[in-house]
Structures are given as C-alpha cells and as structure tokens.
Image: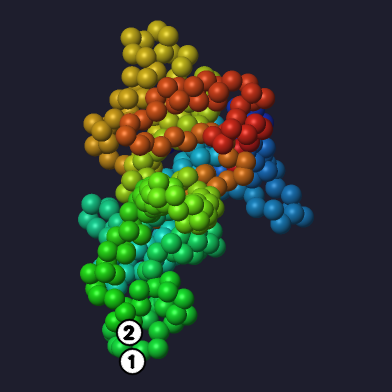
Amino acid sequence: MLELDCGLEFDPARSEDFFLGLPPRPAVCLIEPRAENAEPFLIRTQDLRRRLQRLLGPRDVESKRLNLREFARGVRYRLTGSRLEQTLTYYQHARQFFPNRYSKMMRMRPPAVLKVSLRNAYPRCFVTRRIPVDEAGLPTAGAYYGPFASRRSAQAFAERALDFFKVRRCQIKIRRDPSFPGCIYSEMKMCLAPCFAGCSKEEYHAEVQRLVQFLDTSGGSLRATIEQERERASEELDFERAAAVHKRIEKLDDALRAKPELARRIQDLDAVILQRAAEDQTIAVYAVRGGRLAEPCFVRFAEIAGQPRSAEHIFRDYLEPAAAEVPLGTGDLGEHLWLVARWYYSNPREGEIFYREKDWPYRRILRACSRLLAPKAGRTDSSGSAGPTKSD
C-alpha cells in the first residue's frame, strides 16, 4: 500500500509555521479530526500548501467555502510524482477509510470490454462493463477483451471485427426453428443463422472459436489465413481473386486500427507502467498482471551506482514469475481495470507502458527510464510524441 508517510500536527495558534512546513507539491492528504468519532477528510491536490491554507486558514464568516480549522488535529500526506500514483494512493486510502462510498468518491465506473459468452449454447460477442470472477479472481462465464476507452469505441471495433465472421449479433434466445424468418444478417449471409437451423451446432462453435482466436491474437490469426489465400491465388495466376483478397486485408487492417494496443484478453493483460516518482532520480514501476495492478516498485537510480545489483536485476526481481506470487493490491478486477484505463486513455498521457509478450523488453524499459528522468523538454510518451507532462 502507498502509505501516507509524512505528517504534521495542526495548532491553529501556530498555523503560519504549519503551512511553511508543507511542500507546495502534488499530494494525497488525510486531515485527521479532533473528535474521536468523526470521519477523517481525504483530499488530493496539485499544491498541498495552497490547498491546506484554504481549508485550515482563518475562517471568513462571509464565505461559504468549506473550512476545517476547528475540525483538524493534524494531517498525514504522501507526495506524488504522477497522476497514476496520486489516483492509486487516493483509491487505496479511500477504500480503507470509506469502504461503503469510495467508488462514488472517485466516480468509478468499470471500463467497457468485449465479452464472448462461451457458456451460452450459441455465443455472441457484445460490449459489457461487468466481469464476474471466480474465487481465484479470474474472469468467468466467457472470454473478455479490453479495456476500451468507452462503450462506443468498443462497439465500433466489435462491429468492424464481426464483419469477418458469421457469428450472430442478435439478442434473442436461439430455438433452432426452421419456420423462424431470420434477420437481415442471415439474409446477407453474414450469420450462420442458428435461429432457423441454418447450421449445425458444431459449425457454429467452430466459427466462434475462429472469432476467439482472432481476438486472442489481435487479428493475427485471420490475417495469416487471408495472406495465405492471397499467395495461393497469386501462384495460380488468379490475379483478380488475389486483388479481391488483398482488399480484404486492407479492410482487416482498417478494423484493427480501431483497437487500442491496451485492449487484449484480460487474463493476458500483462504490462509494466513506468512513471516518474516524487523522489529525485526515481522511477515508479507498476506491474499489471492479468488486468490487476500490483504494488509498485520504486527504482532509485541515484542509489544503484553503489549497489551490487544493476537496474535490470531490480526489474527482473519485480517482474519475473517468482514476483508474481506476491499478493496483488486489494480491490476487484473492474476497479483495477478502471485505474489502468483511466491512466492509459488520459490526454496527455504521462509515462510509458510495455507489454509482456514472450518476455519482458528489459532494454526498452531501461531506455524509457532514461527518457523519463531526462529534463521535461526531452520527454516523450509511449506513442513517441513529444510534449510537456503534467499531473492530474
């Protein structure tokens, strides 16, 4: 847990000394009450000194602004070096002190994901915000892909992707009734039409597996199949068919451009987020394992020169499989996906993210650390675009 590791007692008679002892920097702060039965007051701010001067300064009897001067006994706070660190710190402490209303305090809403409902007799792909999990915390009742920036963006990608498959898009209960008239997708030969027994159950499930494989590989499985078809057409000198197949590849590439890099099967969402920390020459490292944020690791480069371990060894100790046995942060999967998505889709997005494929790209991670520790004018985000960084 990201602890509130600094604190000061508050005495209204010596408030000027109190305010001078506060740094004018971004922080998460807990204002502790004098009364034993009162709830504390949790805030996040970009300027701790200025915010507390407003809350704990002398009361203006003509103002309706909130004043906690008589309420406060002291403060505990944590300086934060990035939007992600501030949001995660606030989340952890809001969950601890206000378990019944922390989600409303943060305006949390699970991000949109695509679900292929594999438990259904005739599965379909649709957008949802609900991800049920089992006792181990793994998604159940289907395959989930995301998170997306919004329901609209998830739906737009799904519609384009489903054009390559004959999986149903309707929400009706399938009865396999030959007298059923079907829908427009079956008339356009864009669905295998299980509703009026237009296919066998085995044929339909084979098509669903093609869709799942497509989503699992971010379109790679379908692209490889279409490219093989184009090569065969070229070898047979059927250039008209090869040109038509090539247009399908272009259509596929256009559909895949609507899928953000972050969106993938939730169980396979293994990544590492790098952020500049509040300490000098320090990088905050946030592992994402199966869509959940792990407790961060702080790599202090100023101290590494005098240590026997290199920076890469520190990253390996934190990211390798043995480290995955360390319990993850508290909170449900939807909340963690919200935290990750909120950072990833922010604009501008500060910091960088790298994904685990077969292994972690340690050299790229270390180069990214150098970029983040460089002066602000030289920093770039993970998309390669230059620009200033700022906190939330």
How dense is the environment of label 1, judged by Cα within 10 Å: few (below 14), some, or many (20 and up)? Answer: few
The answer to which of marks 2 and 1 sits earlier in the sequence is 1
Marking on residue 222? none
Which residue is at the front of the view, 199 or 311? 199
Q: Residue tagged by mark 2?
A: 196
Which residue is at the front of the view, 58 or 297? 297
- Does residue 164 appear anywhere in the picture? yes
Q: Which residue is drawn at 33% across and 31% down?
A: 359
Is 259 situated above or below 311?
below
Q: Do the residues labelled 2 and 1 touch (CB within 8 Å)?
A: yes
Is 353 situated above or below 283?
below
349 displayed left or right of 89: right
Q: Of all residues shown, which one is farthest toward the front? A: 237
Provide residue 235's location: percent of width, then percent of height.
40, 46
Q: Quadrant of the N terminus?
A: top left
Which residue is at the front of the view, 56 or 153? 153
Provide residue 337's location: percent of width, then percent of height.
42, 50
Q: Residue tagged by mark 1?
A: 179
Provide residue 382's location: percent of width, then percent of height.
54, 34
- Does residue 90 appear anywhere in the picture? no
Q: Helix or strand or loop: what does disc 2 sit on?
A: helix
Q: Residue at x 40, y 50 (%)?
A: 236
Q: Which amino acid does label 2 sit on?
A: Phe
Q: What residue type is labelled 1?
A: Ser
Provide residue 100's location: percent of width, then percent of height.
41, 60
124 displayed left or right of 5: left
Q: Splitting the image into 4 quarters, where does residue 46 fall?
A: top right
Q: Of all residues shown, which one is farthest toward the top? A: 306
Q: Helix or strand or loop: what does disc 1 sit on?
A: loop
How dense is the environment of label 2, judged by Cα within 10 Å: few (below 14), some, or many (20 and up)? Answer: some
Q: Which residue is drawn at 35% across and 78% down?
A: 193
